[in-house]
Amino acid sequence: MASNSPDYRFTEIEPAWQKRWEDEKTFAAFKGCSKDKYYVLDMFPYPSGNGLHIGHPLGYTGSDIVARYQRAKGKNVLHPIGWDAFGLPTEQYAIKTGAHPRKTSIERINYFRNQLKSLGFSFDYDREVDTTDPNYYRWTQWIFLLLFKRGLAYVDKRPVWWCEELATVLANEEVIDGHSERGNHPVVRRSLRQWVLKITAYADRLLDDLEGVNWPASTKKMQQEWIGKSKGATARFAVEGIDEALEIYTTRPDTLMGATYMVVAPEHPLVETITSEGQQKEVTSYVESAAAKSDLERTDLAKEKTGVFSGTYAIHPLTGNRVPIWVADYVLISYGTGAIMAVPAHDDRDFEFAQQFDLPIVQVIDGPEGESLPYTGDGKLMNSGEFDGLSSKEGIARITKKLGQSDLGEESVQYKLRDWLFSRQRYWGEPFPIAWVTQEDYQRAVDSGTLGEWIPENPVSYTDENGERYALPVPPSSLPLRLPEVESYKPAGTGESPLKNVSDWLEIWYNYETGEFVPASSEKPSGDNWIRATRETNTMPQWAGSCWYYLRYLDPDNAEEFVSQESLSYWEAPDLYIGGQEHAVLHLLYSRFWHKVLYDESLVPTKEPFTKLFHQGMLLGEDGKKISKSAGNGVDPVEVVNEYGVDTLRLHLMFLGPLEARKPWNSKGIGGINRFLGRVWREIIGKDGNLNPKICDDANESEETLSLLHQSIQKVTQDLDRLNFNTAISQLMILVNHLQTCETVSQSTAKCFVKLLAPLAPHICEELWERLGETPSVCYAPWPTVDASKLDRSDVKIVFQVNGKFRGQASISKIATEDEVLALAKEEPRVIAQIKGKTIRKVIFVPGKIINLVAN
RNA sequence: GCCCAGGUGGCGGAAUCGGUAGACGCAGCGGACUUAAAAUCCGCUGUCCGUAAGGACGUGCGGGUUCAAGUCCCGCCCUGGGCACCA
């Protein structure tokens, strides 16, 4: 007991119970336990300097209620928390102040942890993970090496999104409308050497396996669209005057006969070749101006299409007609083949372009009556010679086949998904466990056999001003490869990270067998395994650590393996994952990709990491607008706790509306929740601080009370299963409102009520549970079960309707027949008034619910 | 432009299978207790007509199906989210 106060003093109760939970390790998941498991996971936070905002307790309360509910249902619950602590804000702070980001991270983590503890979440703090801890990122690096050896990591010099403000490149997914997702800074295209992960190799599996997961439909859809699989055909058009064919991709081979011109992207490798002498000047200046345009100008602002004629013609593969080839930036180099056949009659973009440049438009699909061109739907083929009259579907098959017969094309599948740009030019991220060496040294290291299976089939290499360099994996046993100390956290200014300036770490004598290294400036150590090497200056993006953290929780202290197979076979994957929808594509897609690689290595037992996913909705400010510093509409959870207590905050957050809904904060309603808890308290604790005298052992409860109690057990159980916390709370309010009107309440009813409320408002319930004479913690008290015999009352309420409108009601035995109910209805004055002078044409009787008299 | 989710009192929201629309809470009004206030408790509270009993209307708008529609169907409007030259 935290106090023997007669009043509800949350300021005493809450810290006391939090301390007891901590001392007794109430929420530690059991090891080697035979009980069924339940793993409920939150998206782990980035420990920012500002501490918790009100959005954190929203989702975390939802998962905490589930965790506590599942414990009461007898499950061995794993409910962990950790820190996604690599990240730009910490690094920007380091640049500004010179404070080491690891030191800053640890301070911020301590601050966050204390705040979370003061909110009473039932996390197992013994299993914390911290992505910046070398004992953690060693395994992030190790998983990278798995990808590397499987040929899923490669280096490429490619045009990438460069953000000047952040001094780093960003992945496609991190760029929104030409601006960085974080900080909203402008980005530009730059060609830089980058690490790339071959996520496209998993495109089909990432798509197909979505079918088996229990996720919000909209999130599945977003991933499907991001992967963007389409089926169609490639076709090769001969080009007049040159040997090479121009290959295009189309999803509508049925419209092939309507192709009246071709378009290649300005970056297409054949642009120079196909440009005629006369068009040289025009094409060159167009290509240059296209390159100078930002992507914003090329897409969003491109209301008017632009392009130039190359001066050359392609030959239509079926008709032999001459088809002009244009260069235009509405065709993207990065998708399909970077070239298209243009069918203006049946494609909006081609239609617009054709009109603008006065190119011919030939209709080849007969659309429904009244459809004008461009018509992009299906229909019967026309103006298509031998294919006339076919449906689009048949046309696609027949024309693709025809192309295949003369080897001019074939079926093809394309994806919008691109490979994942995996390197950043920053300090505060995992170093790549890679040594760049000469071809000769690479071969020597490979031939030595010391790296065993960790060598990819095809070496990863690139060429720079110093010649060709080969990527040698560091020996996995030598991990972690730690971040070196640096003098300045500022980027090198060359598009490279601050690591570029740490020459003693960067340029080294390197032992390929042990991973040991010494600065290249010092003498080469003796022994055959020492070679000259250069470190990778890029670091991994923040997503890396969050790709697999849910696995490390199962076995966080394991120094031998990333997680033991024993732990995996017991805990498998999270049963429930709660987090914001802003990660619908990024984190969730990357994580699924890594999980599948681990699955292919037989290192995890499931194909998918997150079988059930739930998004908590965004909490808006009281003004109904997004919470932001500039709007000044934020809510400080700590202030709320000081004024009303944790239990009130929890209930209030859950009572605002459905967890998944976007909804405004309401500072007025919180008083009502606080009053509810006060009523609960007074129902059980009397004015003298002892048990309320109305609670007695042998209280003979009315049928009404017992029925309501069991209805409430049923309703709350169902609602917690479905995460409908708002209606669970309202049912408990109904119950306590009723108990208040009873002269006596039995011990068992009071205890049952406390158990039902405990997952939602744990501190007050622990206190009441103990004062009701129960030990130990209410967290492990078995969840109440419904007694069906108490559920139904013998009488039910029947509603009378005349012509579908409510005209009164009566209580009657639930087994009453239609005739009995009808007789009763006909006695009701309101019914009599309505059927007066009319004939009853029909009677609809729904037993236990309504009787409806149709009269006119 | 396309796709998805949503629109219910003064406010947040409830209505699980088509069966009393507005549970529960906030705010508001009236009352009890109190010297007074706070706290607590009780009652009222969708709109309109009516002293009342009761009646009419009512879930974004317009149609439809049904004995019965917030719920199902068709067509619009608005809000939020996603995608956006992906051929």
Image (spheres, helix red, strand yellow):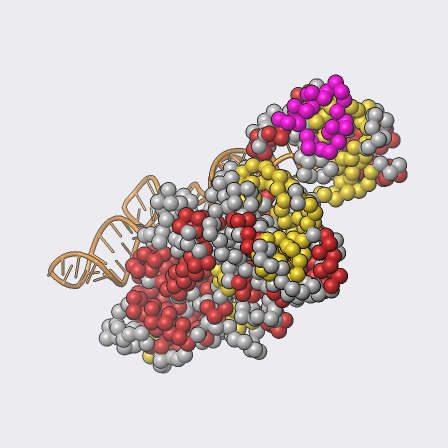
* Of residues B29 and A240, the one drawn nearer to the viewer in this rendering: A240
Q: Residue at x 66, y 48 (%)?
A: A155
Q: Give coordinates of residue A519: x percent, y percent.
A: 57, 57
Residue found at the very far front of the displayed protein:
A523
Q: Residue at x 79, y 24 (%)?
A: A313
Does the magenta segment cover residue A475? no
Q: Tell me, yes or no, if residue A381 can be seen here.
A: no
Q: Main secondary structure of the magenta part?
A: helix
Q: Is residue A420 left or right of residue A837?
A: right
Task: Count numbered badges in the picture.
Answer: 0
Q: Quadrant of the N terminus of chain A?
A: bottom left
Q: Residue at x 32, y 56 (%)?
A: A639
Looking at the image, residue A688 lies above or below residue A488: below
* Of residues A694 and A553, the one drawn nearer to the viewer in this rendering: A553
Q: Residue at x 83, y 25 (%)?
A: A241
Does the magenta segment cover residue A276? yes
Q: Give coordinates of residue A383: x percent, y percent.
A: 81, 26
Q: Give coordinates of residue B42: x percent, y percent.
A: 28, 61
Answer with the quarter of the image where residue A704 lies: bottom left
Looking at the image, residue B52 lies above or below residue A600: above
Residue found at the very far right of the displayed protein:
A405
* Of residues A515 and A280, the one drawn nearer to the viewer in this rendering: A515
Q: Give coordinates of residue A403: x percent, y percent.
A: 85, 36
Range of residues picked out in magenta: A265-289
* Of residues A840 and A181, the one drawn nearer to the viewer in this rendering: A181
Q: Tell me, yes or no, if residue A137 can be seen here.
A: yes
